Amino acid sequence: MKYKVLLIEHDASSLRVLKRVIGKSNLDVVSATTLTQAKAIFSTTPPEAYLCAVVDYSLPDAPNGEAIDFALDSFVPVIVITSSTQEDVREHILSKAVIDYIPKQNAQIYDYLSRLLQRLQKNKGVGVLVVDTSRRRRAAMISLLQRHNFDTHELAKPEQILDYLSTYSNIRLMIIDNQLGDIVGIDVVADVRKHFHKDTLSIIGSSEQQSPTVLANFLKSGADDYLAKPYCHEEFFVRVMQNVEYLEQIALIRKTANADYLTGLPNRRHFFNQVHEQLRRSHTKHTLALMDLDLFKTINDTYGHDHGDVVLKEFSKLLEKHFGKFCISRFGGEEFCVFIVDMDEAQALPLFEDFRLAVSEKKFTRKGVSVNCTVSIGVTSKFKKKVESMLGYADENLYRAKDAGRNQVISDLPISTN
């Protein structure tokens, strides 16, 4: 679903820039220059269609933030923009349940707005856990987080944290108070870090104690950040955003390092890491298949490498469709691998035969030119100490499939052909 953003801005130059910024975030912009126009727009479009409203604090027919109240009363989250630098205006804005406010001070604010809009879309899948014995303090944080579309969770008892984090795998950030009855939040953080690495869970410690020692001990115990109470609205959101974005950057780096650059499939190194992890968990039946696209060089020579890349990408999508729940990889060139646990080759052969048939029936099209391609597959369940031994057996069967005429599945077992 592509969301809309209602932009209410009377200055023509700012309106042009803001339209461009919002459009780059893959959002549809619906603009108005007055509160009266905004009301007319809302009379024909349901509020649910809007991700948020970006509202100028002072409009010709709403000079004191009346447009903010209108959007909030219409159940649309609001980002306020203002050219005023007066403290009383800032306090008036932040007294309302807005997402954030952005002063029109320099060009950097447009970059911040772009990040904020992207976060509002991403945050729907990001869980945040607030741990505090005070219901009032939990409710205050939860309210702020919900303005930013986070999936919010709360706990009063720290003893439940580990089970809770294991149950709700989408939780990426935990905000924890230091005063938790008889338990100290710093000690809880140290315990959580034994089970959840900084690459998967960010932790913000918090306390009403005005002591640098508390901050230092939180960080030394494994927290990523610290929020002193009482905190201001803006500091809270900046710290939350920075910690969530840090995790996303780590995930992107890891994905880039583990993925094949062309197809997006796991690369050979990551494949072996996944397989070794699977083997630690399971010691029963295993099946490995080595695949090679038949006469792939001919496709490159005849139709060009761009068409060859299309074949590799589309073949990879088909591989993910058939075997995505197992360990799969592009080994290099036109060679691919699949590893399946808890299934011997007699059980797995029909899966590979179905896949071989699907490849042979698919047309790989680029710029109106379609080509057919087939795949040869070598399958084995033989295993001697290391998974690398299976590759040798699978490679032998792959060679037999090629030697027998290609477009075949060959295993250690005899198979019937129709």
Image (cartoon, rainbow, N blue to C red):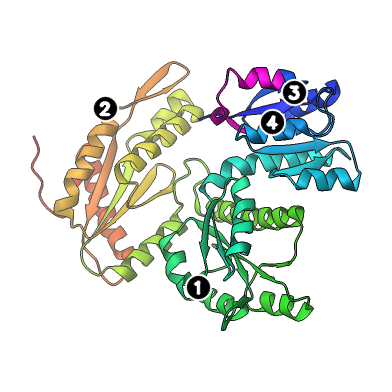
Pinpoint residue 272: horizontal percent, then vertical percent.
40, 61
Disc 4 designates what residue?
Answer: 70
Where residue 80 sits, quadrant-wise, is top right
> Disc 1 and disc 3: Cα gap in Å?
46 Å
Magenta residues? 37-51
Q: Amino acid at mark 1?
A: Lys
Indicate which disc, 2 or 4, sits on the residue closer to the N terminus.
4
Pinpoint residue 364: horizontal percent, then vertical percent.
38, 26
Indicate which disc, 1 or 3, sits on the residue closer to the N terminus.
3
SS for callout 3: helix
> Disc 2 and disc 4: Cα gap in Å?
58 Å
- 4 and 3 marks in contact (CB < 8 Å): yes
Disc 2 designates what residue?
Answer: 361
Residue found at x 23% / y 44%: 352
Q: Amino acid at mark 2?
A: Glu
The question of residue 43 being in magenta is answered with yes
Disc 1 designates what residue?
Answer: 157
Q: Main secondary structure of the magenta part?
A: helix
Q: Amino acid at mark 3?
A: Leu
Q: Residue furthest bottom?
A: 182
Crowding at mark 1 (Cα within 10 Å: few <14, some 14-19, many 20+): few
| Position of residue 404 in the picture relative to residue 213 (left or right) | left
Pinpoint residue 89: horizontal percent, then vertical percent.
86, 43
Crowding at mark 2 (Cα within 10 Å: few <14, some 14-19, many 20+): few
SS for callout 2: helix
Q: Nearer the viewer, residue 120 or 281?
A: 120
Residue found at x 43% / y 65%: 166
Crowding at mark 4 (Cα within 10 Å: few <14, some 14-19, many 20+): some
Q: Residue 35 shows which numbered tag? A: 3
> Disc 4 and disc 3: Cα gap in Å?
8 Å
Indicate which disc, 4 or 3, sits on the residue closer to the N terminus.
3
> Disc 4 and disc 1: Cα gap in Å?
39 Å
